[in-house]
Amino acid sequence: MGKDKLKRFEENKNFSCLFQPDFEEVFRKDYIMKGKWNSDYFGNDNPIVLELGCGRGEYAVELARKFPDTNFLGLDIKGARLWRGAKTAVEEGLKNVAFVRTRIEFIEWLFGSGEVSEIWITFADPQIRRDNKRLTAPVFLDRYRKFLKPNGLIHLKTDSPYLHEYSCALVRRNSFEILTENKDIYKSIAANEHFDTHTAELLSIKTHYEEQFLSQGHPITYLCFRLPSQGAIEPPVWDHDRYER
């Protein structure tokens, strides 16, 4: 392990905006902050928006800058990446953003019923041929609805046609309400098409990896839908071989 990474891990311990629960604290056990993020950390009743697989936290930090009356939480397992987002939040004095280092599989033990208003899934691994690892698969949507407000929003922003089309097929199969579906958001933004001002502002944020995807010619897609709090979620009829990352 490199010296820079070790240094970041040490610095992470001192960031009040970075939570690093041990395995025993979140494995089939309610985390101490569950149901208490507003009262015990943010100190307000503002909506909580969750970003899954947040990487370096660039998206969560920029959302926090743009929307000071909303609280943002970024989750990732990579501590060396989270260091960047946490350090930026501390340096800028951003009180409406925090980060959690943990596995997304443990998410249902982190948040209480109705505690989260919206979920962002940004550039997640499409997990081709690993259905139950895909962050928009029924197994994960069932976990999200345990803490998402009724009819809360799911946002998916990705460079993967596979993940986008799979998610669209699942949403249609289950008749979820689609708010926005777009296969090339920056082309649409440039042409002033499809998006209201608020949505365009949300989608205009570009992370380091997103810039790399764009430079390689990958169009960035977006899907936003409401997740009902009840009812079975059926997987889509899906051709795995049709799409590639």
Image (cartoon, rainbow, N blue to C red):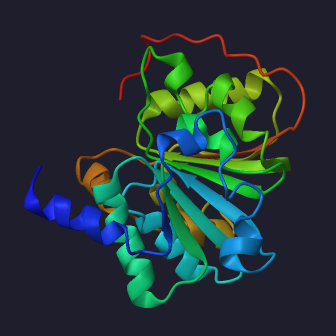
Residue 128, located in which quarter of the rendered image?
top left
Instruction: Tell me residue 78's x, y (percent).
Output: 34, 50
Instruction: Tell me residue 182's x, y (percent).
Output: 58, 46
Residue 83, located in which quarter of the rendered image?
bottom left
Is residue 200 in view?
A: no
- The answer to whether residue 196 is above or below residue 5 is below
User: Along the horizontal axis of the image, is 205 left or right of 209?
Assistant: right
Is residue 154 in view?
A: yes
Q: Nearer the viewer, residue 231 or 11?
A: 11
User: Along the horizontal axis of the image, is 2 left or right of 148?
Assistant: left
User: Along the horizontal axis of the image, is 133 left or right of 84?
Assistant: right
The residue lying at 65 percent from left, 33 percent from top is 28
- The answer to whether residue 8 is above or below residue 123 is below
User: Along the horizontal axis of the image, is 129 left or right of 114?
Assistant: left
Instruction: Tell me residue 152's x, y (percent).
Output: 80, 50
Instruction: Tell me residue 27's x, y (percent).
Output: 58, 35
Q: Nearer the viewer, residue 64 or 192?
A: 64
